[in-house]
Image (cartoon, grey):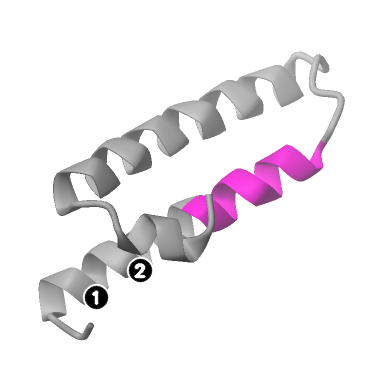
Amino acid sequence: MELKEFRDLSTSDLTKQLEEAHQELFNLRFRLATKQLVNHRELRRVKKMIARLNTLLKERELRIR
Protein backbone atom coordinates (compact mmCIF):
# COMPACT_ATOMS: atom_id res chain seq x y z
CA MET A 1 0.00 0.00 0.00
CA GLU A 2 1.01 3.57 -0.58
CA LEU A 3 1.52 5.99 2.28
CA LYS A 4 -1.50 8.01 1.14
CA GLU A 5 -3.69 4.90 1.38
CA PHE A 6 -2.43 4.27 4.92
CA ARG A 7 -3.23 7.87 5.90
CA ASP A 8 -6.85 7.36 4.80
CA LEU A 9 -7.31 4.41 7.18
CA SER A 10 -8.72 4.77 10.67
CA THR A 11 -6.54 4.23 13.72
CA SER A 12 -8.07 0.82 14.44
CA ASP A 13 -7.42 -0.26 10.84
CA LEU A 14 -3.81 0.92 11.13
CA THR A 15 -3.41 -1.11 14.31
CA LYS A 16 -4.83 -4.16 12.56
CA GLN A 17 -2.46 -3.65 9.60
CA LEU A 18 0.44 -3.35 12.05
CA GLU A 19 -0.46 -6.65 13.73
CA GLU A 20 -0.69 -8.35 10.33
CA ALA A 21 2.70 -6.94 9.34
CA HIS A 22 4.28 -8.24 12.55
CA GLN A 23 2.80 -11.67 11.87
CA GLU A 24 4.12 -11.58 8.30
CA LEU A 25 7.58 -10.60 9.57
CA PHE A 26 7.52 -13.51 12.01
CA ASN A 27 6.61 -15.91 9.20
CA LEU A 28 9.34 -14.52 6.95
CA ARG A 29 11.96 -14.87 9.69
CA PHE A 30 10.83 -18.43 10.30
CA ARG A 31 11.12 -19.24 6.59
CA LEU A 32 14.56 -17.57 6.52
CA ALA A 33 15.76 -19.72 9.42
CA THR A 34 14.56 -22.90 7.71
CA LYS A 35 16.12 -21.78 4.40
CA GLN A 36 12.77 -21.72 2.61
CA LEU A 37 12.76 -17.98 1.89
CA VAL A 38 13.54 -17.25 -1.74
CA ASN A 39 13.28 -13.45 -1.86
CA HIS A 40 15.20 -11.80 1.00
CA ARG A 41 13.90 -8.35 0.01
CA GLU A 42 10.54 -9.24 1.52
CA LEU A 43 12.05 -8.86 5.00
CA ARG A 44 13.15 -5.32 4.24
CA ARG A 45 9.79 -4.44 2.67
CA VAL A 46 7.85 -5.65 5.72
CA LYS A 47 10.19 -3.90 8.16
CA LYS A 48 9.72 -0.61 6.30
CA MET A 49 5.96 -1.07 6.30
CA ILE A 50 6.03 -1.63 10.08
CA ALA A 51 8.09 1.55 10.51
CA ARG A 52 5.65 3.55 8.36
CA LEU A 53 2.66 2.26 10.31
CA ASN A 54 4.32 3.05 13.64
CA THR A 55 5.14 6.55 12.41
CA LEU A 56 1.55 7.18 11.32
CA LEU A 57 0.20 5.94 14.64
CA LYS A 58 2.65 8.18 16.53
CA GLU A 59 1.67 11.17 14.36
CA ARG A 60 -1.97 10.58 15.20
CA GLU A 61 -1.17 10.21 18.87
CA LEU A 62 0.66 13.55 18.87
CA ARG A 63 -1.88 15.09 16.47
CA ILE A 64 0.84 16.24 14.09
CA ARG A 65 -1.21 15.87 10.93
In the picture, measured across the screen, residue 65 lies left or right of residue 27, that is left
Magenta stretch bounds? 40-49
- Percent x, y of residue 35: 83, 17
Badge 1 vs badge 2, beta-carbon distance below 8 Å: yes
- Percent x, y of residue 43: 68, 41
Q: Quick one: which residue is furthest to the bottom in this view?
A: 64
**Figure quadrant of residue 12:** top left
Q: Which residue is mark 2?
A: 55
Quick one: SS at disc 2? Answer: helix
- Percent x, y of residue 47: 56, 50
**Figure quadrant of residue 42:** top right
- Residue drawn at (13%, 81%) of the image: 63
Which residue occupies the foreground of this view, 19 or 34? Answer: 19
- Percent x, y of residue 20: 39, 31
Check residue 59 in the rendering and tell me which mark sits there, or answer none: 1
In the picture, measured across the screen, residue 64 lies left or right of residue 52, that is left
Q: Quadrant of the C terminus?
A: bottom left
Say what amino acid the circle numbered 1 marks.
Answer: Glu
Q: Main secondary structure of the magenta part?
A: helix
> Compared with residue 43, is residue 54 higher up or lower down, i.e. above or below?
below
**Figure quadrant of residue 27:** top right
> Compared with residue 63, is residue 23 higher up or lower down, i.e. above or below?
above
